[in-house]
Amino acid sequence: MKKILIICLFSLTTNLNAHPIDQSKGKFEDKFRQLDEVFPGPNQYRAATGEPTNEYWQQQADYEIDIELFEDERRLKGSETIKYTNNSPLDLKYIWIQLDQNIFKKDSIDYQTRTIASDNKINFSTLRNTNFMDEFEGGIQNLSIKVNGSEVHTKIVGTMVRVDLNQKLTMDESILIKIDWDFNIGETNALSSRNGYETFEDGNDIFLIAQWYPRLVAFSDYEGWHNKEFIGNGEFTLEFGNYDVSITVPSDHIVSSTGVLTNSEKILSKERRKRLKQAENSVTPIFIVSPEEALAIEKEKSQSKKTWQFEADNVRDFAWASSRKFIWDAAGYKQNSKDNPLVMAMSFYPNEGEPLWSKYSTEVVMHTMKIYSKYTFEYPYPTAQSVNGPVGGMEYPMITFNGPRTVADENGIRTYSRSEKEFLIGVIIHEIGHIYFPMIVNSDERQWTWMDEGLNTFLQFLAEQEWDIDYRSDRGEARWITNYMLSNNQVPIMTNSESLLQFGNNAYGKPATALNILRETILGRELFDFAFKEYANRWKFKRPTPYDFFRTMEEASGVDLDWFWQGWFFSTNHVDISIEKISKGTLDTLNPKIDSEKDREDRSKEPEALADIRNTQEGIITKVIERPDLLDIYDEYDEFTPGIEQLEDYEEILEDLKDETNSDPYWKKNALQKALSKNQNYYIIEFKNNGGLIMPIPLEINYENGEKEYIKIPAEIWRKKQKSVKWLKRSERKIKTVIMDPYWEIADTNLENNYYPRRMVPARLKPIARKGIKKNLMRDLMKRNQEIVSHSGTTNEGVSNE
């Protein structure tokens, strides 16, 4: 029942018109209604400020694992002991354990519910996948579970197994869970999976091993058991713990892993240990295994095995990679941290990644830690690693899998394009960034993808721009999300991961853009950075919900942002604010002599009637010209000449301005006279909200004297009228043009109605020619035996332009 209520609550949040307060009169829609009506209330574990209380708790799961890789069979066999500690106030009669490899079983929900887009087409990836699955026996096999040395009843449910305890696990007590298992490793490219193997033409494999061991399902104060089935999109939420892992692989393999290698004396040669020590004090990467050494090793397969031992403290997961093809480089990243001053930044990659990987990978790892730490907290772990393999991009504590490689020409010379270079830089920033979110700030990826992907993509954008101002980021800027915001094929950000439409735009692009707008336009950098850093530090090594994030950002910035969360995260509205009309006026004096002259001047500016023009052209003589005796006083004085009664009324009007109830009875008269003395123009600007999403209104006002003024009207201008508002601008200068959102900072989807007066729409007509050819300047110049010279004037073999 608890979960049904939570689901109902989350459904409610996707339609904020369904408020407990019923607006039954009129059509008023309160875009500023407070979200306290929708958010789960604060409790003894989570405060109204968005921070964990002193009574906050979370479970602990510590692992001792022995795993062996059978390379030829592409199979893993493992044994583990889990110490599970119940820190909750509840007694547990059973526990849930994840068996993520079961997603590759033929009866899994993921496999059985895959759809096809067309009734007359099928893509080659689908053919490859179905062919592989026809012969592949996936899923956990030979599973054996004991608790405290005793047999227990178990029930497998998809990608999880329920373990019924022989005795309740009470608060502050621990149990030991002994598990044996094995499984076949899938081919990553055939399964489109986050783990597996890749086979090269030389017969060697790269193994990227993740979601490989039975692990505790998270148990939290707000969800209980997080036992939602793993069916693909929604990733993981896990418990923190300490790991002691022994990995047995062929003797000539190099292993990259979560944690710290504890038996290097047995595993690494004296020379490699020496290089690793040198790397600690090197600001640039040093080869631990050089390209030449890796090339020699991969030519022969060892028949013996070695066991690599790793330890990792306070991590929520564990992953590793193994191959004889790996080049290995490393550098020591120094940070201003008393607890963790040195981080070993390392990269593992085959020769097929050169020269791109050795030039950039480890450098980007260090850059990412520097930038992310500036906005959050110092990196808390001893290593940060980037590994190349068949997975395009995936993250785990201390280790990431990243995909881009170089291309060999007919002579075997490897080069890369600018796009491939930027792809590598971007994906490493993104995946190393994930070590912060969600590997440390432990949000629930399976429920709310945006909490790690969106926040991380936002920080990725900041890191990319601090890498190179000309880096071509593809997410973060407001201008890049507008087409998606107009799309009908979307759901609110606050939608469960498995139900998202346009996954990348919804979970990555839109929340990253929202946070960038919040930082640059709404809060400003100082307020935003303080609040965001507060959130990161409050929930470091803890499990936040979206509401903890929303509340912290408001509480720490001191700004009510409910309207912003409502529009960007709980709706599919878009931004389209138009300048409908600008009226120009001057302030009347109430004196009929002066104001009547203004009326006469206004009439003189009106165009002459077309009939009068043509009558004059035809020489038509009017009656009163023929007969001047028909003229009278009204022909001598026009309609704008004030009469005696009007002049007398003026004196009465001035007297009526007297306010006897006020200590200054002449305040109205004085206010009018002071305003008249300023001789200002009055401009009434009418804005219309066409898209439904309210935002501040940034304006660039261009004056006739050549001066410019930038004004930002706060979003609260829409608080009583959400469809259309009028705003007064006073100025001694005369306005020439007004541009709404001149810097494209609020994701406005229609630029053309942002100009007043309207501009001519700029366009370029491009003749239709043949399809464009991908450029690889490095390859082209090398073919012509030319050098690529960097901006500094030095030869740079790792640069491509596009």
Image (cartoon, rainbow, N blue to C red):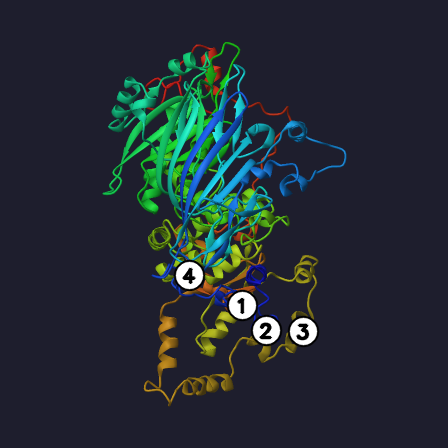
**Which residue type does callout 1 highlight?**
Asp
- Residue 113, x across and y down, in percent: 67, 42
Figure disc tally: 4
Label annotation for residue 627: 3
- x and y percentages locating residue 317 in the rendered image: 43, 41
Q: Which mark is residue 89?
A: 4
**Residue displayed at 39% across by 76% down:** 672
Q: CA distance from mark 3 to mark 4?
A: 107 Å
Name the element at disc 4: loop
Label 4 neighbourhood size at 10 Å, few (<14), some (14-19), many (20+)? few
Q: Residues within 10 Å of mark 1 (few under 14, many from 20)?
A: some
Three-letter residue code for mark 2 = Gln
Pointer 1 residue: 30
Do the residues bearing badges 2 and 1 touch, measured as CB atoms within 8 Å? yes
Residue type of the residue flagged with mark 4: Pro
State the residue position of label 2: 23
Task: Select label 1 or label 4 by which is in front.
Answer: 4
Circle 1: element type: loop
